[in-house]
């Protein structure tokens, strides 16, 4: 019996650790978007050439596919935040830099604060975005208390970042607050545009 990990879990592992961290079957599952059993069949068909055969098949079927993580919503963005940051005792403020297809270009920590605050300036948030040629950004920070409700400071920071993004032509598409077990999205709650 083949263990079948969730495709999203495998995509995050690929984005975070690279293709070397995945087995041949896992890599084929992610790249081709097939079940683990189908991936095993393709790997076996490769006659000992596992990855190479699967990648040849991939090249035939998916010209132009980019394996970078797709950040198509708050859940996907929150899922990219490492567990050590979600559970950290200090606030960490990160920026996810996205291309025009909402694929992750990079994830940067821009500030590490205290138990209940982090100092964030638009300059630090947008510098990695500019350097990476990002089309959009998602801001993410953790709340060590575990309560993901936005504070007044969180709301003001979001307003400042949204305005700065508008001026730079790199929109802030969401601001997400994470904890070990949950997240809050300014976009999904309707606060981002207010």
Image (cartoon, grey):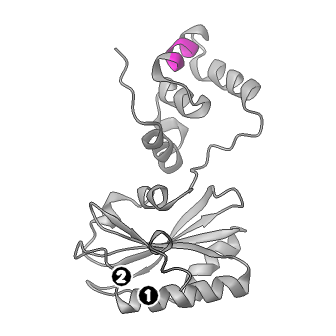
Which residue, given by chain and number where applicable, does mark 2 sit on?
Answer: 150
Q: Is residue 15 above or below residue 183?
A: above
Image quarter of residue 55: top right
| CB contact under 8 Å: marks 2 and 1 | yes
Image quarter of residue 60: top right
- Among the two numbered marks 2 and 1 on one chain, the one whose residue lies closer to the N terminus: 2
Q: Is residue 129 above or below residue 9?
A: below
Q: Is residue 189 above or below residue 124?
A: above
Residue 62 at what x, y percent from top left? 72, 32
Q: Residue at x 64, y 22 (%)?
A: 52
Q: Residue at x 48, y 29 (%)?
A: 26
Identify the secondary structure beneath mark 1. Answer: helix
As for residue 40 lying within the magenta part, the answer is yes
Residue 44 at what x, y percent from top left? 54, 10
Residue 54 at what x, y percent from top left? 63, 21
Which residue, given by chain and number where applicable, does mark 1 sit on?
Answer: 155
Q: Which residues are magenta?
A: 38-43
Q: Residue at x 44, y 73 (%)?
A: 189
> How many numbered marks, from 0 up?
2
- Rate crowding at label 2 as few (under 14), some (14 to 19) or many (20 or more) other CA atoms within 10 Å: some
Structural distance between the alpha carbons of marks 2 and 1? 7 Å
Tell me, for residue 104, which label it has, or none: none
Identify the secondary structure beneath mark 2. Answer: loop
Looking at the magenta stretch, what is its main secondary structure? helix
Image quarter of residue 122: bottom right
Q: Residue at x 53, y 43 (%)?
A: 18
Along the horizontal axis of the image, is 25 left or right of 4? Answer: right
- Rate crowding at label 1 as few (under 14), some (14 to 19) or many (20 or more) other CA atoms within 10 Å: some
Q: Residue furthest left?
A: 145
């Amino acid at each position: 019996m083949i263990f079948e990990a969730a495709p999203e879990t495998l995509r995050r592992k690929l984005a975070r650790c690279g293709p070397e961290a995945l087995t041949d079957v896992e890599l084929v599952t992610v790249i081709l978007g097939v079940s683990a059993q189908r991936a095993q069949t393709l790997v076996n068909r490769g006659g000992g050439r596992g990855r190479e055969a699967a990648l040849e098949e991939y090249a035939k079927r998916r010209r132009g596919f980019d394996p970078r993580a797709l950040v198509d919503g708050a859940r996907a963005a929150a899922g990219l935040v490492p567990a050590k940051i979600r559970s950290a005792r200090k606030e960490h403020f990160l920026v996810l830099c996205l291309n025009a297809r909402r694929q992750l270009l990079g994830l940067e920590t821009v500030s590490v604060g205290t138990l209940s605050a982090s100092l964030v300036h638009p300059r630090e948030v947008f510098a990695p975005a500019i350097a990476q040629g990002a089309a959009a950004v998602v801001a993410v920070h953790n709340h060590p208390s575990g309560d993901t409700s936005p504070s007044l400071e969180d709301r003001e920071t979001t307003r400042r970042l949204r305005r700065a993004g508008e001026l730079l032509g790199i929109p802030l598409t969401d601001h997400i607050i994470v904890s070990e077990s949950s997240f809050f999205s300014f976009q999904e709650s309707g606060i981002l545009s207010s």
